[in-house]
Amino acid sequence: MRTGAPEVPATGVWAEVVGQPDAVGTLHAAADAARRQVRGEQVPPGAMTHAWLFTGPPGSGRSIAARAFAAALECEDPATAGCGKCTACRTVLHGTHADVKLVVPEGLSISVAEMRALVQAAARRPSTGQWRVVLIEDSDRLTEGAANALLKAVEEPPPRTVFLLCAPSDHPEDVSVTIRSRCRVLQLRTPLSGAIAEVLRERDDIEPQLAEWAAEVCGGHIGRARRLATDELARERRESVLRIPLGLQRFADVFTAASGLVKLAETEAVTANEDRNESEREELKTAMGAGGTGKGTASATRGANAALKELEKRQKSRATRSQRDALDLALVDLAGFYRDVLVTRTGSQAVLNHPDFARASAKAAAEWTSESTLRRLEAVLECRTALTQNVKPLIAVEAMLATLFTG
C-alpha cells in the first residue's frame, strides 16, 4: 500500500535501505520536518514525532532503516537530510556519533539497569548534533522492568530527544501496548528478490548468477543473502540442514541429526564470536594493567580478575544468543522446506522457498500426505517456540526430529 510519501532516490544514507521506497519517503519527510523544526519554522502536526517503532520480518532492514533515519536527523548538509558524506552521517552509520546511542542487545534480554542508565543519558541535551537519538535494536528483548523504565521516558520525552525502537511486529508479545501507543509505527516489508540481487551485484560485486541464487533462497533476509553469497561455509551449513528431512531413514538417525544440528549452531556461534571475545579479553587485560610490576600490582590483579569474570559472563550470554539465533535460522529453513512440499502437493504456482531443493521437495510430496507434512511443519514451529522458553536445545531438537521421522 502506498503511503503518499514522496519517493526518495536511493542515495546517501538511504542507499542501504533496500526495497522500502514508502518507508524511505516517510522517513526523509520526517527528517526534513525535524530540520525545519530546529530552525524554528512551523511544521505540520505529526510531521515529526519523538518516538518511532520500526517493525517488519527478519531481514527487512529494520535497524538499517533506523540508523539511516538517525543519520538524516544529524546530517550537517544544508541541502539534504542524509547526504551520507558528512562527518555526522558517517559517524552515525559507524556507531560512533556522540549524540546517538545504539543499544544492540548481545544477551537474551535488555536489563532494567541498562535501560535506566540509557534513559538518564537520553535526558541530556545534544552535545554536537541537532538531536539526541536512542536507537534500540531488538526492543522485543526488553524485560518488563526495562520496558517500564523506557515507558516513562517515552511518555515525557526530553526536548530534542528521539527514540527509535526496532521489533519484529507491534504485537503485544513484542512491544507492550503502552509503549506502542506512544510511537509512530513504520512497517517494513520483505524486500523482493530482484532488489536484493541488485544490491549484491552492484554494491558487493557478487557474480550475477550467485547473487540471483542467494536472493532467491535467503527468504527476503538481506544480511543472509550477503552471507550466503560470500561465505562457502554458510552455504554448506544450509545444505546440511535441508538434507535432514529425507535423511531420516531410521529412528537412530533422529539422534544423529539432532546432535549434528545443535553442534552446527554451536560451531557457528563460536566462529561468530571467537575473534571478538579474544580481542575484548586482551583489551581488558591491558586496561587493567596486566603485566605491570611494583606497588599496587596485587590489588590491580584482583580487580582485573573480577572484571574478566564479568566479561566472561557477558560473552557466555552472547554465545547463548548466537547459538539460538543460528539454530532458529536452521529451523526457518526446515519450515520452508515443508512449506515447499505442501506447495508442490497442491500444484500451486507459488514460488518455492528453496528452489534449488525442488527435486527433494517433489520426492517428499510424492511420499508424504498433506496431513503428515503439516504435522512435520507444526513440529518445527513448536521447536522454535520451545527454544524461546529456554528448553535445552538438544531436547527440543530431538523431540522435533522424532516427529519429522514418524510424520
Image: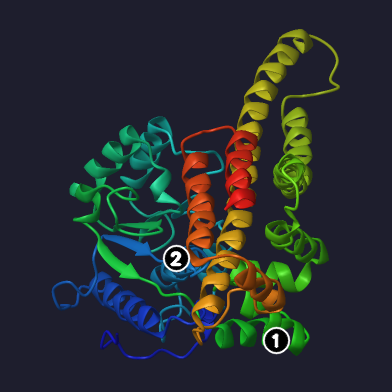
Question: Is residue 84 among the parts visible in the rendering?
Answer: no
Q: Nearer the viewer, residue 271 or 118?
A: 271
Identified by mark 1, the residue type is: Arg
**Position of 86 relative to 159 (above/below):** below
Q: Which residue is mark 1?
A: 201
Q: Categorize mark 1 by other alpha carbons within 10 Å: few (<14), some (14-19), many (20+).
A: some
| Residue drawn at x 37%, y 64% as measured from the top left | 55
Q: Nearer the viewer, residue 275 or 259?
A: 259
Structural distance between the alpha carbons of marks 2 and 1: 23 Å
Which mark is in front, 2 or 1?
2
Residue 128 position by quadrant: bottom left
Identified by mark 2, the residue type is: Pro
Answer left or right for 121 relative to 385.
Answer: left
Q: Disc 2, disc 1: CB below 8 Å?
A: no
Residue 336 position by quadrant: bottom right
What secondary structure is found at the residue carrying circle 2?
A: loop
Q: Categorize mark 2 by other alpha carbons within 10 Å: few (<14), some (14-19), many (20+).
A: some
| Residue drawn at x 47%, y 71% as measured from the top left | 68
How many marks overall? 2
Q: Which residue is mark 2?
A: 57
Q: Quadrant of the N terminus?
A: bottom left
What secondary structure is found at the residue carrying circle 1?
A: helix
Say whether disc 2 or disc 1 marks the residue closer to the N-terminus. 2
Question: Is residue 169 among the parts visible in the rendering?
Answer: yes
- Residue 114 image point, x, y percent: 43, 35
Answer left or right for 100 relative to 406.
Answer: left
**Position of 134 relative to 388 (above/below):** below
**Position of 142 relative to 21 (above/below):** above
| Residue drawn at x 39%, y 72% as measured from the top left | 188
